[in-house]
Image (spheres, rainbow, N blue to C red):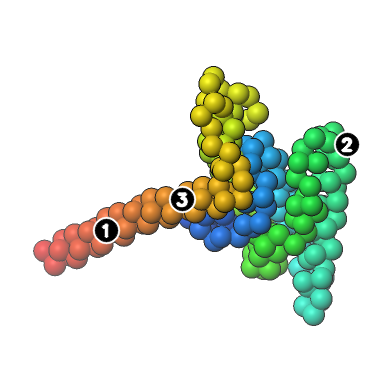
Amino acid sequence: MMKKDRLNTLTNGIVKSNPTFRLVLGTCPTLAVTTQAINGLAMGAAVTFVLLCSNVMISLLKRVIPNRVRIPAFVVIIATFVTVVQMVMKKFLPSLYDALGVFLPLIVVNCIILARAEAFASCNPVLDSALDGLGMGFGFTLSLTFIGIVRELLGAGSFFGLPIGHLGNVSMTVFILPAGGFLVYGTLMALVNFLTGMAENRKYAASSHKEKKDEKEAKV
């Protein structure tokens, strides 16, 4: 794969195929843990680590794993790295471990990780699989962190747990409740898709204009 293609693989998950806003994957942890920005960042980092490691391992073993048992094999590989994350977080970050709760072990069956294992890592080289895992993980982390920032600001008047002036006096608790999570998620998804659609339309218009210009020059 050429350098440009690898760059596209790395950046694809950040905007164009963002797993949260564009592919709508992993919505359960997205809505559940983003009551605070730090929780979103921690969950995103955990998923990124598992994505990167499992993609690399599955790519390395793709010729060894029998096709009939590939999904169970993928789950075992993913579960191994999730267990590592759990043990490290429980030892060194117990407060975050408690805050993420059941959604930390549920990374094992996270749609994003299983989808990338099946659709990309199982049929691509190791380096490309690693870049795909990093890009998708980074896009997921950005999305969860941003949703957490919005919900925390509006719902608690704080930023990463730090109170902001008197904002807490006018905060709206609904934004750190499930209803507020759906509202923020839906609004940001609509905004991201609107902006992405505009960018794609501009790119298509510029490409069409260039093609027409080239045709005119060729006729001359």
Q: Is residue 125 left or right of residue 139?
A: right
Q: Amino acid at mark 1?
A: Ala
According to the picture, the residue beneath numbered tag 1 turns out to be 205
State the residue in front, 41 or 58.
41
**Does the residue at mark 3 contact the one at mark 1 (Cβ under 8 Å)?**
no
Q: Amino acid at mark 2?
A: Lys
Q: Tag 3, which secondary structure?
A: helix
In the image, residue 191 sits, relative to residue 91, either above or below, namely below
| Quarter assignment of residue 95 | top right
Residue at image point 65% right, 28% down: 161
**Spatial distance from mark 3 to mark 1, Cα to Cα?**
27 Å
Q: Is residue 115 left or right of residue 153?
A: right
State the residue in front, 128 or 75.
75
Q: Tag 2, which secondary structure?
A: helix
Q: Residues within 10 Å of mark 3 (few under 14, many from 20)?
A: few
According to the picture, the residue beneath numbered tag 3 turns out to be 187
Residue at image point 71% right, 50% down: 47
Q: Amino acid at mark 3?
A: Thr
- Identify the mark nearer the N-term, 2 or 3: 2
**Spatial distance from mark 2 to mark 3, Cα to Cα?**
37 Å
Q: Position of residue 101 (x, y in %)?
A: 79, 47
State the residue in front, 134 or 185.
185
Residue at image point 54% right, 37% down: 172
Q: Position of residue 143 (x, y in %)?
A: 56, 46
According to the picture, the residue beneath numbered tag 2 turns out to be 91
**Does the residue at mark 2 contact the one at mark 3 (Cβ under 8 Å)?**
no
Q: Tag 1, which secondary structure?
A: helix
In the image, residue 142 sits, relative to residue 218, either above or below, namely above
**Spatial distance from mark 1 to mark 2, Cα to Cα?**
53 Å
